[in-house]
Image (spheres, helix red, strand yellow):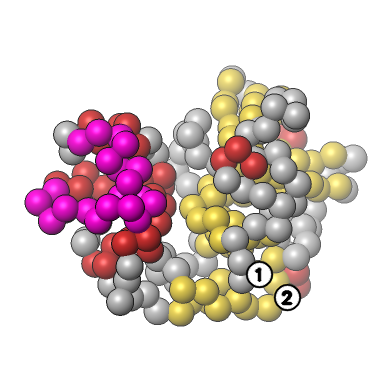
Amino acid sequence: MIDKKEIGQRLKIIRKDRGLSQKELGRLIRREGSEISRWETGKHGIPSTIMGKLCEILKINPNKLYEEQPIIEYPFVTKIAAGSPIFSEENKKRMVNINELFPHSPDLLLLKAKGDCMEHEGIISGDWVLVKTNIEKLDSKSIYAIAVFSCGLEKVEVTLKKVKKVGNQIVLIPANRGYEIEVYHQSDIQIVGKVVRIIRKL
C-alpha cells in the first residue's frame, strides 16, 4: 500500500521533471502552490476531484502515483573515465536494487554526491542521485550532472549544479553561497544528464 508521503514524493519528481514549480503547477490546476507543497510532503492527500486535471497537465497515468513499483536495477558508477562516453563500461562495478518510479532504462544512471555545493536544493554529501542522461533541452530550474574537463581531457571532474547557457558558454550555478558561479566554454564540459531523484540512503 502506497502512503501519502510516497505519493507526494512521486508527484514532486514528476513535477520537477516537467520543469514546473509548485506555484506554476498550482496555477495550471487552479490551486495554491502551498497546497501542492502539502501534497508533496504527504501532509494532505491529493483530492480525487483534481486528479484527472493533474494527470492531464503532467501527462501521466494515475497509476504512476498510486501503483506499487517493481524492483529495478540501475548502473552504479564509482569512477569517471575521460573521453567519450564519459562513463566507461568497466567502471560499472555492480547493480543496485531500488524501488523506483521510473521504468528500467539505459538512460538512467546512479551517482553518489560529494560536497555541499547543492545543499540548499536538498542534496548533501553522501546522497545518491538518479540522473536521466537523455535530455532534450536545458532548463534553469533543474539540477544537472556536469563533467568538467581539464589538462587536455586527461582529467575529468563531475559536479552537480544548475546551469544556464549563454552563447557558447555554460554557467554552472551552485545552491550554496559559499561557492562561486563558474563559467566554461561549452567545449570544456559535457552535461551528463538531469537529476530526477535524490536518494538519501541505499
State whether residue 17 is above or below residue 162. Answer: below
Residue in front for this viewpoint, 47 or 164:
47
State whether residue 187 is above or below residue 113. Answer: above
- Indicate whether residue 65 is drawn in magenta: no
Q: Do the residues labelled 2 and 1 touch (CB within 8 Å)?
A: yes
Residue 134 x/y as whole percent: 49, 52
Q: Which amino acid does label 2 sit on?
A: Lys
Does any portion of residue 144 appear in the rendered image? yes
Residue positioned 46% across, 73% down in the render: 99
Quarter in which the N terminus is drawn: bottom left
Please rate how many residues cluster around mark 1, counting C-alpha atoms within 10 Å: few if below 14, some from 14 to 19, many from 20: some
Q: Is mark 2 on a helix, strand or loop?
A: strand
Question: Which residue appears farthest toward the left when viewing the image?
Answer: 49
Instruction: Say which label, 2 or 1, has the lower sequence index.
Output: 1
**Numbered circle sitting on residue 76:** 1
Residue 26 x/y as whole percent: 25, 36
Does any portion of residue 146 appear in the rendered image? no
Q: Which range is magenta?
A: 31-52
Q: Is mark 1 on a helix, strand or loop?
A: strand
Q: In which quarter of the image is residue 118?
A: top right
Residue in front for this viewpoint, 58 or 169:
58
Residue positioned 62% across, 48% down in the render: 123
Residue on which the image places disc 2: 93
